[in-house]
Image (tube, rainbow, N blue to C red):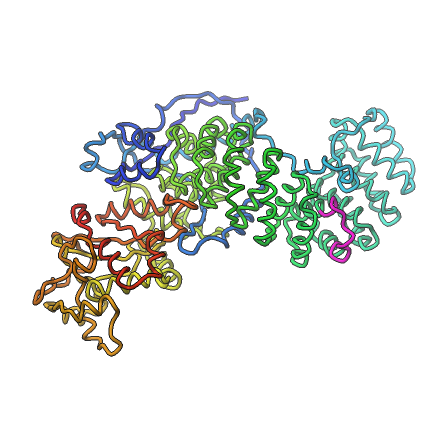
Amino acid sequence: MATVLMCRRLPRLSRVTALSTTAKRKAERGSSKSKKEKRDKPGAAKAGTEPGATIQLLKPQDYRVLYNPAAYAKGRAGSQQHLDRDSSQALGDTFTGPGTPQAPQAFPTASSQALSPVRNALPKPRSGTLLEQTILATLYKEEAEKENQELHNSKEDPRMFQKGRPEYRSLSCDSAEPAQSLPAEEGDSILQSVAGCEGSPGTLTDHFLKLSRLPAERRAALASDPRFSALCHRAVTAIRLFNTSDLIQILKASVSLAVPASHPLLNACEAEFCRRAWDMGLEQLLLVADCWRCLDRSVPSYLGILFSYANLHWRDLTLPQFVQLLYIIGEGRRSPVDLAQKVESTILKHLDAFTLEELGAICLGLFKSLSGISDHVMRRIADRVALQMEDMSTYALVNVLKMLRYTRMDHLPLMRKLGKVIPARIPATNIQGIMHITLTYSSLHFFDEDVLAAVATSLPSKVSYCRSKDAAKFLWSFGCLDYEPPNEAEFYSSLIKQLHVKAHEFSKFPEHLLTALLGLAFVRRFPEELIDFALREEFVQKTRGSKYELNKDLFTLGKSVEIECPTYQGSRLPPRLYQEFTEMVSSFAEREIYVRPEILEATSLLESMLGGPEYVKNHMILPHTRSSDLEVRLATDGRPIPFNFKDPVAAKKLKGMGVSLTDDLMSQLIQGRAHNQSPTEVGNEARIPGQEAAGTPCLGGALPAGATSQAEPTAGRWQPREVRLALQVSNRNHFCYGSKRLLGLHCLKRRQLRLLGYVVVEIPFWEWFPLLKRTRSEKLSYLHYKVFCPALLTKA
């Protein structure tokens, strides 16, 4: 076997420095404080080492790593329909590519404001072939990695629930090694006898059963033996002569013999079982369905008959038969609509009788088949799991979490109990199980530092077993919850390295790279080689062909790089795409976001307080963050500045307009406008109530009698001595569940607003929503304090 000398270079990483709000965020994060301080120290963002040389054995060039992502893809697609309207973010992901070289830099924290906000961890390669070399090397290494897989990466057995009751023996096919092996010589004798006589159906059945008891290595050789092919041909010819029991025995023997799914014998068996199905019993139908699953053969027609039969004989289903049926439904990735109501009622009927493993199997079947389930049933399942979680296997527990995530169920007792039970189990859990646990927390916006820290501690040693999907989900989950673990340098560097290792998967699954890069962007990490690849035209075209909506993710990534990585010199999205994405997001916002009651109320009150609609703009300052802002502009002396002029003619009329603050206007501001007030009079209202009405310090928001407002500023330009406020009318979907901890996307938005010079003013839901039921004067007083707080002007 040939050898090759390969140089490995770790990816280049840009890291944005902390901004002026670091102190506030530290206080909010509690125990995360120490790691934030560590991150801001000089050189803390560096990741990687000097290039090193390794010698590897070459593998055949046609080697490929194959896996089936269908189960994840369907589960994700199903769960997305439950996402919140303006906080939904596609979990898309993509690929990486080399970027433009740039020298590494390390800046002291004290001088960070005067320096570039990007720190480069590693120099870029001089050519664009690094990723291609990595992909080639990875293909050669995969086989060796698979041979050395550890126990924690082994696939869990989804049929463990069948070991809990003896009744499952008649419903399932046991593909384990036969109790008594047949000598290889006897197998040769059987095959030799096939050529001499036709044989009766009973004899042919006996031949298959005996051959299925041969040693494993001898059974593997049968596929290429012409005598075995002759035996199969005779069985196909006599297929209608077999009784149902013998035909089932031949199918079970085919499982042990590892007959290929497309073999003519199995084609004939499927057709015959479909013909006989209505004359078979439910036990036989379930057994045959299990054999098809063991043979990895898709049999939609047979499953359709099975589901129709079960629907007609539903009352006759025993508990094991019901669980086995749901298992088959899940493995077939089919959700019979006419069974949905019956499934729910049967779950409730047997809920206390199910074993914990059976509950896990039921949830997995529902999850894989994308079967909807009511909140009531899911809550009842979660109630029982929360009480007996210590006695449940991790595999079954993960399956329950999948369904909890799919139904978007906020079950606090289960999540709190999970936080106590699961951290100790993380080290012994396989990588896919850990991924699903982590994804459950991020999907439900539930922050538990103990669980996330346990995941981060365990992950680096197992990261080589991550698929691109797994690595992407880990990065997304931590970024979504805006959590950087104590071992953040090791955690992120290992996952970014694994993204490079699995780069060959991104061409087929571009959504995984976008998911990973967005998760990294949420926590201010920008691996430029991967970003360069993701923003290339050819990769953007691949995302257009994806079954997922990835445009919003590309938009968020591209604009975030522009704002947070000013020294980035790699690929960028073309302006036409930005325009297209902006129009798409704006159209959605006009229908779903701008019209929300809490935003409309705040907008209306601000217009009354400041002097009219030209002083407030309800829009998205950063459309790529997909949430609205109420923009207000103030002079440094506290006077509002008009800027929202939709009509140029109206804008000219407003220049030099004076506003007199009278008792009548004050009364209107506090109690509401008079019904007979004309539009002209509305435009002449005073901007804010006085200090006495607000009960808070005022920075001159109300103009003195006879004073005039400033002229309209030039659109899109910063005016001298101007403060731009970005008021954030938030809702619960912007925060972690039951807390005041912002989610990653909304942290990113506020960070980027500050980078662009805006002063972010929070109007949090826990303050604003209760006020919506209070008097107008109370709401005006609250907004007055928020807009004219003295501390705001000092931040400009």
Q: Nearer the viewer, residue 477 or 290?
A: 477
Q: Magenta region's main secondary structure?
A: helix
Percent of width and height locating residue 579:
32, 57
Which residue is painted at 21% across and 58% down in the image? 694
Residue 719 in sight in this render: no
Viewer-nearest residue: 534 or 136:
534
Residue 554 position in % (x across, y down): 38, 49
Q: Quick check: 702 left or right of 768?
A: left
Q: Give how far across and how far down residue 594 sits, in percent.
A: 34, 61
Quarter of the picture holding the N terminus: top right
Q: Residue at x 46, y 20 (%)?
A: 55
Whether 768 is among the magenta residues is no
Residue drawn at x 26%, y 37% is 23
Q: Quadrant of residue 525?
A: top left
Q: Position of residue 632 (x, y in %)?
A: 22, 57
Q: Furthest residue to the bottom?
A: 676
Q: Is residue 313 magenta?
A: yes
Q: Is residue 151 left or right of residue 727?
A: right
Asked whether residue 150 appears in the rendered view, the answer is yes
| 298, above or below 11, in the image | below
| Magenta highlight range | 310-322
Relative to 125, 412 lies left or right: right
Q: Residue 180 vs residue 116: left or right? A: right
Looking at the picture, does residue 309 appear above or below residue 613? above
Q: Is residue 442 above or below residue 461?
A: below
